[in-house]
Amino acid sequence: MRKLIIDLVERTVATYSVAFLGLLLADKFDLTSFTAIKAAAVASLPAALTVVKGAVSTLVGDPKSAAFLSGPRD
C-alpha cells in the first residue's frame, strides 16, 4: 500500500506542476496577476484526474502501482 501511495503522490505532484507551469508560460509567467491564481486552480483538475486514474488502475494493473500496465513478471 505504501508503494502505491508514494507512486500516486509522485504522479499527482508531477501532473500538477507540469499543468501549472504550462498555464503560467502560456500567460507570460506573470505571478502577480489574477490569472496565476486561476492557473493554479485549473491545474488542480488534471492532478485530481491523476488520482482517480491511479485508483482505477489498481483494479486493472498491478494493485501496488498507479500504472494501468503491470511491470515485467517475475
Image: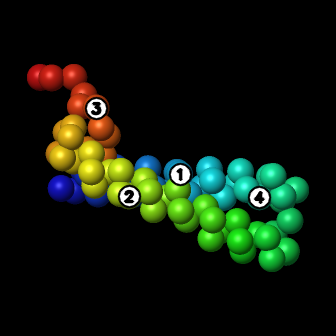
From the viewer's side, name the closer residue of 60 and 10: 60
Q: Is residue 46 visible?
A: yes
Residue bearing mark 1: 15
**Residue neighbourhood size for the residue with mark 1, other residues' Cα within 10 Å, grouped as few (<14), some (14–19), many (≥20):** some
**Residue 12, quarter of the rendered image:** bottom left
Image coloring type = rainbow
Q: Is residue 6 visible?
A: no
Marks 4 and 1, the one that precedes in the sequence? 1
Question: What kind of residue is marked 4?
Answer: Leu
Up/down of 64 relative to 24, above or below:
above
Residue bearing mark 3: 69
Residue bearing mark 2: 51
Q: From mark 4 to mark 2, how far is it between C-alphas?
A: 23 Å
Which type of secondary structure does the marked residue at label 1 adopt?
helix
Marks 3 and 1, the one that precedes in the sequence? 1
Residue 7 horizontal/vertical position (percent): 34, 49
Which type of secondary structure does the marked residue at label 4 adopt?
helix
Q: Residue at x 28, y 32 (%)?
A: 69
**Residue neighbourhood size for the residue with mark 2, other residues' Cα within 10 Å, grouped as few (<14), some (14–19), many (≥20):** some
Q: From mark 4 to mark 1, how far is it between C-alphas?
A: 14 Å
Residue 59 horizontal/vertical position (percent): 18, 46
Residue bearing mark 4: 24
Locate residue 4 relative to residue 73 in the image: left or right: right
Q: From mark 2 to mark 1, how far is it between C-alphas?
A: 10 Å
Name the outermost residue toward the left.
74
